[in-house]
Image: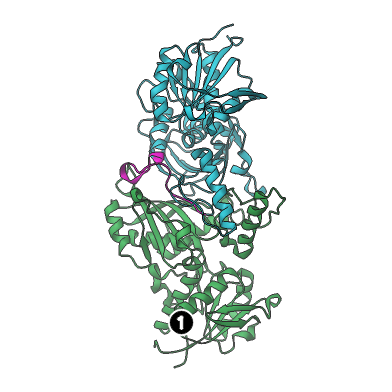
Chain colours: A green, B cyan
């Protein structure tokens, strides 16, 4: 199985996540006999890097997927809804980073460390969860196995790269303008993000929660297979270029100690434990950029409850929060024969 | 009573909070017949502003307090422990912004909106709580009166000015260095703060919590008169110059709705409600700088529990979080005859 080769298309190849998907495919030497970079017509002819090769971006149409085995998509919901069913119909397995299909019954929503088995039953599309969900469930999954997760209160500190390259450009241009006392624009982040924090990511939704916040609720339930899981989220944009941080309070059915949690997380797949406050060792966005793990630290017992912990969880939102998770799914699909390919 | 005049000393007058105390005293036309700026010997001869007057800084010694009615102190715990008992012995009422006396039995720890009555019994020293505690209890106090507060999970987004002028200088110098790809120092904030978040404020304490985090627990209990209150805090420094934000999840004895909370907080003293997500109205550090209120928004019901809410609370940490609260205590002391003075 593993010496098969796959014809791969990256849809949305010029975006921040699309470029990261190409990097991760190359770094991990994913067995691709061919890699096609697809994007909207306005990006056609642009160059994107795939290792030391340069790919010319082609316009994405239904016909682009003829002969493609695997699509990694990060082109937004509208494009995914239009094109991925076409790709699937032509025999490709699509791994989609948009929110288009995540909550649809029958579409697996997968974080390989947590629910790899959910991949088996698909209709050509597997959804990649939202960045802030992925890192949280990677940390909570192994703790749930031990103690039975029932309730989460989470506050996020999300990097501007979650809004793509334009999100990063706005932080740098505003910062430079402010330091030079020049005027600046606000267009991406709802309010000025430089030297500020903005408690509003995405659009306003039910109950005063944003859609970004509801993703943490519903996606976590689906991935963890816990339809009753209580999640109370607050999503906040901070002036950090790369790396989401989360303050995660979690309550379990059964008692769980800090020592238990360290032991469990210390050997969990995909997690790096960084937890020594006295030595100033804790996860920070600064240290996670361009890396694949989920970092967990500041593990503390609720002083009042033996069945509750509070954690600090950090990951590169473009890598494990998006591209790396999608490529992990691709590897799993390859290893389990879910995707076509040729020897 | 109100036409008395007071001889006031500001101890730690060259610090970020000391300067703000002088500003607030002037802005609010506090009835001071005399204002003396005191600081450590190394600051002697420096100028500080008090309205449109310039004060020469004098060295703080026990004799500095002869003839002083009121001391506003923000010079750190060591200096407060040395000098404030001397000032109190000489008849001054001391309002101390350090942590030296906050948790001592018999020392009132006061947020006027919440526990003004606690001031009555003092031994010459009244403690001003920590910045992150003040804004939280201002928001929680009126909700507690209605519904009985029992549990809080709080994650903070604290500005660098909480570490004084040197904390602000470090954010600006690191930001400029990074934008110019130059080397920079890390000395104030445990790690690089520019374009990063640091989940470590203060020193490592019991159970893996920092002393900054324990302040939120113990000070809140003392101010609110709730010795059993459960508080689980995570304190995080963010690259913001001024204004602390807090994501506050709170659980009550009795049901309380978003409408209830808006009504209660909308008419509470010292609070400005900014809560319309669809119109992008929510509190942000950007908007709170150099103002006195506590701003509350993003009020949401826990989707699973009618007796729990989650809030977003912002205040200028140097104003309501320090100087303004101290000056409010001074006004109350003046109005209730707790401080000497002369017609």
Quadrant in the picture for residue B27: top right
Label 1: how many Cα within 10 Å (few below 14, some 14–19, many 20+): some
B219 relative to A95 in the view: left or right: left
Q: Residue at x 35, y 23 (%)?
A: B105
The correct choice, above or below, for B337 with respect to B246 in the image is: above
The correct choice, above or below, for B284 with respect to B270 in the image is: below
Residue B92 pos. (x, y %)? 47, 14
Please provide the residue range marked out in magenta: B196-213
Q: Main secondary structure of the magenta part?
A: loop
Q: Is residue A7 visible?
A: yes
Residue B299 pos. (x, y %)? 55, 43
Magenta residue check for B206: yes
Q: Which residue is mark 1?
A: A30
Quadrant for the N terminus of chain B, please.
top right
Quadrant for the C terminus of chain B, please.
top right
Magenta residue check for A240: no
């Amino acid at each position: 199985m593993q010496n098969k080769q796959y014809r791969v298309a990256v849809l949305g190849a010029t975006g921040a996540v699309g470029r990261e998907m190409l990097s991760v495919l190359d770094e991990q030497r994913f067995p691709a006999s061919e890699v096609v970079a697809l994007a909207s017509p306005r990006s056609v002819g642009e160059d994107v890097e795939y290792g030391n090769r340069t790919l010319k971006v082609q316009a994405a149409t239904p016909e682009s997927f003829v002969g493609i085995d695997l699509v990694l998509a990060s082109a937004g919901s509208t494009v995914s809804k239009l094109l991925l069913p076409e790709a699937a119909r032509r025999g490709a397995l699509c791994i989609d980073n948009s929110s288009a299909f995540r909550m649809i019954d029958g579409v697996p929503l997968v974080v390989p460390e947590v629910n790899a088995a959910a991949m088996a039953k698909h209709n050509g599309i597997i959804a990649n969860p939202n960045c802030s969900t992925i890192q949280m469930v990677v940390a909570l999954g192994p703790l749930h196995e031990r103690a039975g997760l029932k309730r989460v209160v989470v506050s996020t500190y999300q990097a501007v790269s979650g809004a793509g390259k334009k999100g990063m450009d706005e932080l740098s241009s505003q910062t430079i303008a402010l330091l030079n006392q020049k005027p600046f624009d606000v267009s991406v982040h709802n309010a000025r993000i430089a030297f500020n924090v903005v408690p509003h990511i995405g659009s306003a939704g039910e109950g005063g929660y944003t859609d970004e916040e509801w993703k943490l609720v519903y996606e976590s339930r689906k991935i963890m297979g816990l339809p009753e899981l209580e999640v109370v989220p607050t999503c906040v944009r901070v002036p950090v270029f790369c790396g989401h941080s989360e303050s995660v309070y979690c309550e379990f059915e059964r008692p769980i100690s800090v020592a238990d949690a360290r032991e469990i997380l210390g050997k969990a797949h995909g997690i790096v434990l960084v937890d020594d406050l006295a030595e100033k060792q804790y996860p920070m966005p600064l240290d996670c950029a361009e890396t694949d793990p989920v970092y967990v630290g500041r593990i503390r017992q609720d002083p009042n409850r033996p069945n509750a912990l509070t954690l600090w969880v950090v990951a590169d939102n473009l890598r494990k929060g998006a591209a790396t998770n999608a490529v992990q799914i691709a590897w799993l699909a390859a290893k389990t024969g879910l995707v076509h390919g040729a020897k």
